[in-house]
Amino acid sequence: MKKKYFNLLCLFVLSINLYAQSSSVTTISQNIDQNNVTGAALLCWVSVPSSEFYGDYHQNVYARSFQLNEDHDIHEPFLVTSVEIGVSRGDDITGTINVYYADSRDLSDPENVLTLVESKEHTFFSFADEAVAVVFGWEALIPAGKVLVVEVDLPPNQEASDNGFTNPSDFKLFAFGLNDEGETHHGWFKAPNCDIDEYINVNNISANPQQIIINVNGQETLSVQNEISSRVELYPNPVENKLFVNLPKDIQIQDLKLVNVQGKKVTIQLTNEYLDLTGFSSGVYFLEINTNEGKYTQKIIKK
C-alpha cells in the first residue's frame, strides 16, 4: 500500500543570481535574499514499498501574497510585467502560474476571494540548466489597495502508474527553490493528495523554514491611470443596463473587457456611446479599457 508523505529531497543546488531589473521597474519580494536558491522546499509525493520504484509526484501548489501598500509602498494600480520563480529541480515539468488580487493576504481565510487577472503556462527545465525561472510577458494590472497573489500550480506526473516508476529516468518532479536567509512574510502551500485541500502557512508543516522564492517585477501605473481617469466619464455607476462611456476625441478605444470577481473576462462592444449590460448578472465587475494612451480599469457595480 502506498504511503503519502512530504519528502525533503537532498538536491545539489546551484547558487544563481536572479534577473536584474532596470531602475524603472520595481521588484517586490518577501525573501531577505531574493537572489540565490539554497535549498528545496517540501513537496507532496507518494512512496511505494519496493526500492525498485521511485514513487508518484502529485499536485503541489505554492503561493505568496503581497500587501502592496503597507509592505512595499505601492499605492497606485500595479502592472505586473514578469514573475521570478526559484527552481531547485524542474525536470521539464509544465506548471501554471496564476496572478490574482485579493482583499487580504490571508489565503487560508474562506471569505477571502481571489480574482484571477492573468494566467500563464511555463515549463520548468532541469535545475542543472536553469535554477531560476523568469517568466516574461505579463500584463496583469492589480487595482490600488489590493493584495497581489502569485500562485504556482504544479500538476501530478501524468505518466505515474499505480506502482510508481521502475526506471529512474522516467521519474520527474518539480522541487521549489527556497532561500534560508529569512523572509518578511510566510508563503502558502496546498496539496490535495497529501490531505491539504486549502492553503496553509507552508512553515507550519515542517520544522525547517520553507522560504520559497517568488519575486514580482512591475511598475505603478500612476501616470497612465490618473491621466486617463481624469478624462474618462462612466455613468451611471451603479448601473442597471446601459453604462455610458464619455471619452475625449484624442483617446481611442482599442478594446473593452468586463471582468467578474472570478477573473472571467468578456469582450464587449461600445454602441452609441454606451455599453449594454442587460445580460450580465448583478454584482461587482471591473471594466478594462485599452486605449491608444494606455490601459484604464474601473470598478463597476451592476444592479
Image: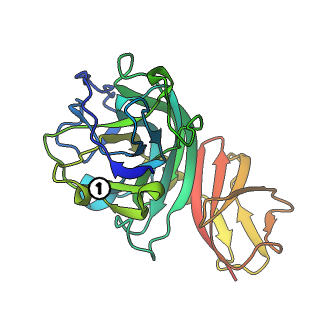
Q: Nearer the viewer, residue 207 or 137?
A: 207
Residue 97 coordinates in the image, percent (x, y): 50, 43
The answer to whether residue 186 is left or right of residue 180 is right
Within-10-Å neighbours for mark 1: few <14, some 14–19, many 20+: many
Q: Quadrant of residue 282?
A: bottom right
Secondary element under disc 1, as helix, strand or loop, is: helix
Q: Nearer the viewer, residue 162 or 173?
A: 162
User: Residue, x 47% and y 32% (percent of image)?
Assistant: 135
What residue occupies the far top of the structure in this picture?
129
Residue 76 coordinates in the image, percent (x, y): 40, 56
Residue 122 visible in the displayed image:
yes
Q: Nearer the viewer, residue 51 or 279?
A: 51
Q: Nearer the viewer, residue 92 or 57?
A: 57
User: Residue, x 68% and y 45% (percent of image)?
Assistant: 250
The answer to whether residue 28 is left or right of residue 298 is left
What residue is pinned by disc 1?
Answer: 202
Image quadrant holding the C terminus, namely bottom right
Residue 160 coordinates in the image, percent (x, y): 55, 37
Residue 68 coordinates in the image, percent (x, y): 33, 56
Amino acid type indicated by mark 1? Val
Residue 145 visible in the displayed image:
no
